[in-house]
Amino acid sequence: MKRRTPRFKRSVITYSLPVRALRLVPTDLAASTFSWGTVVESMNSLRDVPIKFNYYQDFSLNKNCVAWLKSHPVLLEWVKSPYCLRSPPSWPRAVLPAFRHRLIPTPFDLCNVDAQRKVPKKGPEYAQYLKTILYCMGFTTIQIADFVGDSEGDVERDMYNTIEAFFDIPQFLIWATATNFRKSLFPPYFPELSIEDKAGIVTKIRRNPFLLKDTDARRFVESPPYLTYLVYGSPKKLRITKHCRLYHTKEG
């Protein structure tokens, strides 16, 4: 029986963060021309058990993409392993001190949230971020170190720096609290806003806190008592919901 090809929702595959992370793997073939849907299907052609997501747009394998996946022994080993696109359940011990307020989004959370491009885009911070994403995709720190020519300690330090930088982004901090804003209190300044402004902020923060404007997000976390409430006292929900999910990995 012919295996049914998974269907990919275009809005969740056009942001090719995992493809860009995989470009850290040193090969002579370029990966940047492949969509994420094509990469997943090409991976599946090399696996005994395919990786399936709930997508809605058809994609097919690409022979050049398959050749790229086979061009590095560690990359091919990972593709065929049970850890391929399976986020580990926890972070390396050396990375944990980077998290603040006892808020520790999992590797799955970080890899699959639609951060609305509020992430590093260039320079050393971007490279550090991509190493972190490789870890979230199921690569070990030893494998990542081998790819980029660093020590395992260097990779863990880069991951630490990535997490530390995320906590300076107010949208990330709000999202990391896992607050259910359908049941929670809103910040003290909220009565000052017009009905229209309130409605806009409420709609965005309930769907995905990363949709908030920087000024609005900062006002949510600038009050220490309210931030304490968000961290420790607010009603909670899953960090990854259908409104903010990018289908990059499965949970480990």
Image: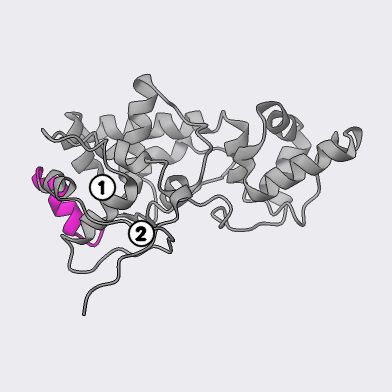
Report the residue marked by disc 2.
Answer: 58
Residue 138 in sight in this render:
no
Mark 2 → mark 1, Cα distance in angstroms: 27 Å
Location of the N terminus (image quadrant) = bottom left
Magenta range: 71-83
Report the residue marked by disc 1.
Answer: 139
Residue at the image position 25 percent from the left and 73 percent from the top: 3
- Residue 77, how many percent across, how many down? 13, 53
Q: Nearer the viewer, residue 63 or 40?
A: 63
Q: Is residue 52 left or right of residue 196?
A: left
Front tag of 2 and 1: 2
**In the figure, 81 relative to 172: above or below?**
below
- Residue 15, how many percent across, how many down? 42, 41
Residue at the image position 13 percent from the left and 46 percent from the top: 74
Amino acid type, residue under disc 2 in the picture: Asp
Helix, strand or loop under label 1: loop
Residue 167 in sight in this render:
yes
Q: Residues within 10 Å of mark 1 (few under 14, many from 20)?
A: many
Pick whichever of labels 2 and 1 is earlier in the sequence: 2
